[in-house]
């Protein structure tokens, strides 16, 4: 899952802040660039350059990752994944910024009545949500969260929540209205891995199993399943009589096992970014995706009969069932797809004149709780209850409405929430101040009565560094053009290839000040994340002993993933802190503090980089700085402020030896086109991008780390300019 949501410091001030950033080297001049690109022999060969840069930059990570994949127990696998993450973080190809959530909010949506599971897309399914006509007070919200923790797994939470709200004077309603900032690019859930697409589509179909509001995996389109003794075959028995309908509710077929086969083949044909999830997991998938075979019958998914679908894995995967809530396993009505010009295998062509599948809400078949009744670009998306839904009598919400917000009026979500136009809003720095002043009922301010801190989510937002930049304006619209000249571009390319330089810019950012521009001073540390995979994402279930720093270290059962990441960083002599053992009231956490910002260590890393780069012909000084382009959305005030905070912090810490060019996109879409809506690394139009993040697809750390695998296997390698 990806990209959610001052003062310009002059050079003289930067020099004063850290005099002589490079010692004697900093005072030298070099008007003639003598740097030679070490990958010059690969000019014009993007894949070849990507291979070489990856090998030079991330080989330690990849080697550790491969070792983890060979582990023979789940706990050893998770521990070795933590080692791999430590290597990844120390490579400094990206900088953790923040988690989803961790902001002040006001809402009519009752807590934990939609799934809060950290992976997949079930948290975006709202058919069983509980929504009230008035905002829920902070006091009642806290009481409900306490009760959820007690009732989780009992099957009684939803009925208890409804009774509690009724007993405390709330009126329940059957609609839910929320804001959105980007229209879906497609309505074909199997052809995209972009959150803006998948979030819009997830309520139109059901999967085999889904997580309920107690975060318990429940049968959905499947009735039950079995697993072979060797852990390689998963067999699902489907509900009979489930209907496919079109956007008007007209029946177009029955959901059968072959629809899961068709869905899997179409996903692999479309190659929209999800195929990497199953490439090495399902028998034959790698050969089919890579084109080594065109025979889909060799892939380990088959319809045993009309109501039985079977998946065959390459090896046992303890996390397989956790993957079923993500779109990669969505069914697709084969007959309807073909009626929209869809073809399979070598005949698949999404650009064909007769191919209309997924182009709009009227060109997909539905088997989920909702039909899309209206989708007006940059305006409104409306979901109406599907009368043919197999579980229609048990859904709480009959209408979901998305209202478009372009971010320009920072007060509009708050005002719309107060008016009941929206059922909830995040309080930005500006609206928080107003909510603290405006009075609600009971003599309390809106904030005092209703404000709460939203829980930190699993999505990790990162600053990505472009290691192989070839785009200096947006590929799609030509906007957000770099102000750098050719000489500056070459110097930046060389500097970005230096590990100490990347470490310096990572340690130079005051992430608290940066984050405060969006969430306010009160919460500037709450949502900070210090790792890619949340430190508490998994914990060991048995003791594991690893070699670290030449010594054996035993991690007992119960040790969190983040603690092992920190141990490896410490053993390697790293300076970043990614795990706080005192966090979360002593449970430990990777969130809620700034374990990266270290101006002294940043300056020391820069000194090393200056020496190393001077030997390659790149002199760095305040007179000859490295220029880094950071795009932002000028139409949104807090994004503008955030970009300027980034600039101020890095330039100050590095004494003017690095200059951040804040490069404006006129609106959100131009900004998104620099690094979110890009097809591959050749289109990455930035040196630093803070627009994207990742949320896990399943319950294993590999769901994060897989995104940085080489040779097109990793979805996020394009965000560092590779493949």
Image: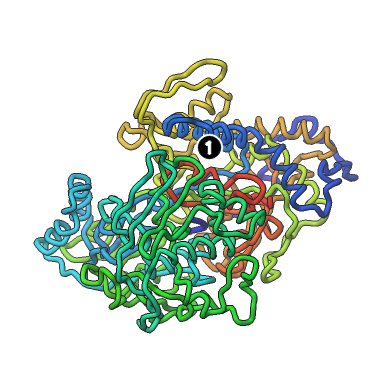
Residue 426 drawn at (x, y percent): 37, 61
Q: Is residue 539 visible?
A: yes
Identity of the residue furthest to the front in this view: 305
Residue 417 drawn at (x, y percent): 32, 69
Q: How many dots with numbers?
A: 1
Left or right: 681 in relation to 669 = right
Residue 448 drawn at (x, y percent): 25, 56
Q: Is residue 579 visible?
A: no
Residue drawn at x 38%, y 49% is 321
Residue drawn at x 57%, y 78% is 341
* Residue 46 higher or lower than 29, as above or below: below
**Residue situated in front as seen by the camera: 605 or 304:** 304
**Residue situated in front as seen by the camera: 167 or 386:** 386
What is the quadrant of residue 425 in the picture?
bottom left
Identity of the residue furthest to the top in this view: 551
* Residue 302 higher or lower than 606, as above or below: below
Q: Element type at marker 1?
A: loop
**Residue situated in front as seen by the camera: 385 or 5:** 385
Left or right: 664 in relation to 139 = right
Residue drawn at x 67%, y 71% is 477
Residue 723 drawn at (x, y percent): 68, 52
* Residue 115 higher or lower than 134, as above or below: above
* Residue 112 higher or lower than 601, as above or below: below
Mark 1 residue crowding within 10 angstroms, few (<14) / some (14–19) / many (20+): many
Colour convention: rainbow
Residue of label 1: 596
Residue drawn at x 48%, y 45% is 512
């Amino acid at each position: 899952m990806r990209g959610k949501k001052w003062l310009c410091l002059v050079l003289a001030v930067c020099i004063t802040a850290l005099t002589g950033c490079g010692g004697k080297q900093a005072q030298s001049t070099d008007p003639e660039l003598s740097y030679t690109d070490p990958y010059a022999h690969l000019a014009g060969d993007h894949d070849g350059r990507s291979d070489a840069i990856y090998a030079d930059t991330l080989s330690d990570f990849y080697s550790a990752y491969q070792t983890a994949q060979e582990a023979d127990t789940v706990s050893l696998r998770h521990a070795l994944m933590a080692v791999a993450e430590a290597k990844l973080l120390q490579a400094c190809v990206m900088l953790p910024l923040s988690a989803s959530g961790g902001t002040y909010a006001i809402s009519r949506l009752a807590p934990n009545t939609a799934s809060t599971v950290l992976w997949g897309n079930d948290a975006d399914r709202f058919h069983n949500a509980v929504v009230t006509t008035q905002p829920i007070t902070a006091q009642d919200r806290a009481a409900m969260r306490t009760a959820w923790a007690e009732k989780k797994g009992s099957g009684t939470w939803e009925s208890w929540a409804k009774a509690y709200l009724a007993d405390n004077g709330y009126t329940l309603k059957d609609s839910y209205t929320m804001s959105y900032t980007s229209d879906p690019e497609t309505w074909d859930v199997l052809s995209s891995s972009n959150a803006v697409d998948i979030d819009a589509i997830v309520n139109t179909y059901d999967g085999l199993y889904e997580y309920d509001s107690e975060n318990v995996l429940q049968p959905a389109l499947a009735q039950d399943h079995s697993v072979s003794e060797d852990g390689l075959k998963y067999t699902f028995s489907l509900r009979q009589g489930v209907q496919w309908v079109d956007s008007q509710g007209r029946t177009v077929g029955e959901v059968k096992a072959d629809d899961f086969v068709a869905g899997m083949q179409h996903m692999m044909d479309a190659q929209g970014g999800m195929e990497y999830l199953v490439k090495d997991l399902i028998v034959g998938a790698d050969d089919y995706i890579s084109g080594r075979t065109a025979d889909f019958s060799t892939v380990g998914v088959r319809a045993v009969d009309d109501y039985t679908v079977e998946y065959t894995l390459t090896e046992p995967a303890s996390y397989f069932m956790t993957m079923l809530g993500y779109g990669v396993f969505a069914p697709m009505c084969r007959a309807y797809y073909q009626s929209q010009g869809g073809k399979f295998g070598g005949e698949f062509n999404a650009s064909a004149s007769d191919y209309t599948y997924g182009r709009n809400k009227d060109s997909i078949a539905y088997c989920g709780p909702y039909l899309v009744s209206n989708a007006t670009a940059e305006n409104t998306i409306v979901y109406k209850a599907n009368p043919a839904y197999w579980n229609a009598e048990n859904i709480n919400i009959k209408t979901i409405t998305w209202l478009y917000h372009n971010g320009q009026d920072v007060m509009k979500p708050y005002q719309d929430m107060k008016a009941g136009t929206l059922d909830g809003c995040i309080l930005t720095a500006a609206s928080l101040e107003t909510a603290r002043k405006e009075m609600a009922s009971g003599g309390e301010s809106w904030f005092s009565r209703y404000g709460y801190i939203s829980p930190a989510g699993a999505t990790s937002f990162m600053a990505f560094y472009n290691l192989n930049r070839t785009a200096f304006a947006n590929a799609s619209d030509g906007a957000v053009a770099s102000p750098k000249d050719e000489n500056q571009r070459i110097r930046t390319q060389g500097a970005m290839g230096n590990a100490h330089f990347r470490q310096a810019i990572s340690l130079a950012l005051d992430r608290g000040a940066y984050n405060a521009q969006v969430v306010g001073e009160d919460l500037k540390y709450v949502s900070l994340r210090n790792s890619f995979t949340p430190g508490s994402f998994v914990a060991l279930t048995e003791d594991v002993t690893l070699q670290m720093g030449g010594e054996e270290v035993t991690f007992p059962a119960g040790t969190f993933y983040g603690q092992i990441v920190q141990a490896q960083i410490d053993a390697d002599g790293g300076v970043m802190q990614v795990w706080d053992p005192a966090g979360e009231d002593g449970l430990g956490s990777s969130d809620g503090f700034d374990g990266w910002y270290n101006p002294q260590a940043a300056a020391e890393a820069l000194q090393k980089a200056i020496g190393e780069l001077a030997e390659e012909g790149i002199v760095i000084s305040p007179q000859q700085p490295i220029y880094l382009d950071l795009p932002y959305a000028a139409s949104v005030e807090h994004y503008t402020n955030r970009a300027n905070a980034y600039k101020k912090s890095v330039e100050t810490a590095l004494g003017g030896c690095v200059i951040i060019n804040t490069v404006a996109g006129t609106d959100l879409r131009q900004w998104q086109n620099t690094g979110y809506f890009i097809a591959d690394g050749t289109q990455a139009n930035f040196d630093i991008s803070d627009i994207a993040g990742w949320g896990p697809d399943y319950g294993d750390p590999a769901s994060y780390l897989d995104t940085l695998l080489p040779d097109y296997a990793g979805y996020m390698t394009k965000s560092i300019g590779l493949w």
